[in-house]
Image (spheres, helix red, strand yellow):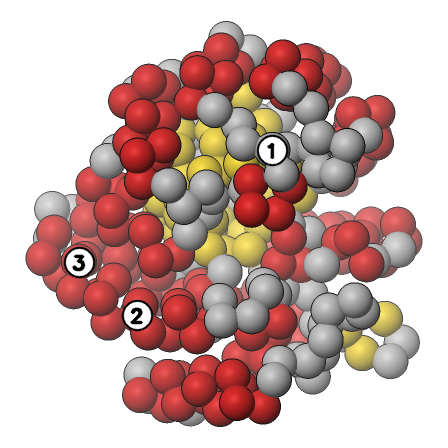
Amino acid sequence: MTVFEGSCVALTTPFCENGVDFDAYERMIEFNIANGTDALCVCGTTGEPSTMTEEEKESVIKFAIAKINKRVPVIVGCGSNCTATAIKYSVKAQEWGADAVLHVTPYYNKCTQKGLIAHYTAIANSISIPVILYNVPGRTGVNLLPQTALKLCEVENIVAIKEASGNLSQIQELCSLVGDKMDVYLGDDSLTFLGMALGAKGVISVTGNVVPRQMHDICALFKAGEIEKSRNLQFRLNPLISALFCEVNPIPVKKAMSFLGYGNGIPRLPLTEMEEENANRLLGEMQKLALL
C-alpha cells in the first residue's frame, strides 16, 4: 500500500507565548495544499514534538487532521525510544484519524538490528494503519540497515521507509533490496532527484515548508519523464536547501517561515534562534528565488 507519491512536507509547529499559534499553523496547511504538497507530516522531527506537552501534541494532531480533512494523507510522527510509548501514540493517532504513522529508530538507549525488528513489529501489530520507518542515524545513533528493512517488509502494514542516512550507497542498496515490497522516501531534500533515480517514491521534506510547489515539482517532473527539468529544479533549490541545514533542523526552517509570515520563528529550548550571519544567508537565498 502506497501512502503517497511525491513530496510530503514535515510541518514546523509555530509557537507563541500561550503555546501553539494555530492561526499560523492553519495558514501553513492551506499554503501547502494550495501548492501541490502530496501529503503532510505532523509532529515529525521538524515539528519539535520532543519539547511539546502531551496536550499540545494531541491538540496539534487533531487540529491538523480536522483542517486537512482528507484532502491529502496525514502522517503522524509517533516515534519514541520506548516501544510501549510508541505503541500508545500510534493507537491514539489511528483513533484520531491519521492515515499513517512515522516511527524514528529508538534513540539514546539505541538497540541492535534484532531490537529494531522487534520494536517495529510490535508497533505495527498494535494498529491497522500503515507504518513508515524512519532511519536518521545522525540524530539517533542507530542505523537501520537495508537487510533489516527487507526483513520488516514481511510485516503487512510496514509499507515504507524514510531514509535519511545521507549515504547514497546505502540508499541504492535499500532500493535494490526492497524493490516493490516497500516504498522508499528520501529524508534528505538535496538527494530528492538522485533518490528518485534509484527508485524512491518521493521525499519527506523540510524544504517543502518554504517552497512546497517546487519540491512537489521535482518529484512530479521526474515521474512524468521530464528528467532534465526535474534535475535542473533540484540544482536551483540546492543553495536554499544548504542554507536551511546550516544549523540543526528546524532552527533555519522556522526562521524561513517567519520571513514568509508564518509564526515568530522561535524554536523551543534547547534549540535557539538562528545566528544572525546564517539568517542573513538564508534570507539572501530566499530573495534569489523571489520568495520574498
Q: Secondary structure at mark 2?
A: helix
Indicate the position of residue 180 as horizontal and vertical percent values: 32, 19
Q: Which residue is mark 2?
A: 237
Residue at coordinates 17% horizontally, 58% vertically from top-left? 231
Mark 3 to mark 1 CA distance (whole Å): 31 Å
Q: Residues within 10 Å of mark 1 (few under 14, many from 20)?
A: many
User: Which one is nearer the viewer's eye here, 114 or 156?
Assistant: 114
Q: Secondary structure at mark 1?
A: loop
Residue at coordinates 44% horizontally, 16% vertically from top-left? 147
Indicate the position of residue 230 as horizontal and vertical percent values: 18, 57
Q: Which residue is mark 3?
A: 231
Name the mark nearer the viewer: 3 or 1. 1
User: Which one is nearer the viewer's eye here, 99 or 108?
Assistant: 108
Q: Earlier in the sequence, mark 2 or mark 3?
A: 3
Q: Residues within 10 Å of mark 3 (few under 14, many from 20)?
A: some
Mark 2 to mark 3 CA distance (whole Å): 10 Å
Q: Residues within 10 Å of mark 2 (few under 14, many from 20)?
A: many
Q: Quadrant of the N terminus?
A: top left
